[in-house]
Amino acid sequence: MQFSSRFTIAVHILVCTAMFQKEQKVTSTFLAGSIQVNPVIVRNVLGMLSAAGLVEIRAGVGGAFLAKPAEEITLLDIFKAVEKEESLFHFHENPNPLCPVGRNIHAVLDGKIDAIQSAMERQMAETTLQQLVAELPA
């Protein structure tokens, strides 16, 4: 399964915001130029990040700002803000109960799939936005 690009776009938006919010106005046009996508896509993702409490969008003076410190925002927070799938894998609906594989596939695979998802979420929860900002070359 491949996720949409919303997650990587959201991370890009937040890294840019963390780096530039004190130096200049961080607008959807500015962000779109860095990401090389249409500003409408940036505005949609910014809306999701705002709804999740990760960014503030200020009208008037304008621009996006982190809603909390970068060291408090994890990749898992970002992922949950923009990806609506509850599970990493979608299991096919109706395995054949008359087939020995179909009858037992959930029993042998469900726990492994859950473990894979937990491992991914654990790793994402251990990585903060601040760590990504710190790893960028100057």
Image: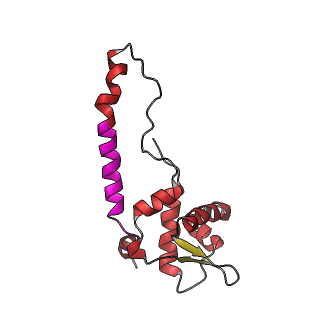
Which residue is found at the position 61% from the left and 64% from the top?
47
Residue 124 percent coordinates (x, y): 36, 59
* Residue 41 vertical position relative to residue 119 in the rendered view, above or below: below
Q: Which image quadrant for residue 102?
A: top left
Q: Inspect this view and state whether residue 35 appears.
A: yes
Q: Nearer the viewer, residue 50 or 17?
A: 50
Predominant SS of the magenta segment: helix
Residue 53 percent coordinates (x, y): 52, 69
* Residue 1 vertical position relative to residue 46 in the rendered view, above or below: above
Q: Which image quadrant for residue 50?
A: bottom right
Q: Would residue 130 be found to the left or right of residue 80 on screen? A: left
Q: Which residues are magenta?
A: 111-130
Residue 91 percent coordinates (x, y): 43, 33
Q: Inspect this view and state whether residue 133 appears.
A: no
Q: Is residue 31 magenta?
A: no
Which residue is found at the position 28% from the left and 30% from the top?
108
Count of labels shown?
Answer: 0
Residue 79 percent coordinates (x, y): 46, 58
* Residue 56 vertical position relative to residue 41 in the rendered view, above or below: below
Residue lying furthest top: 98
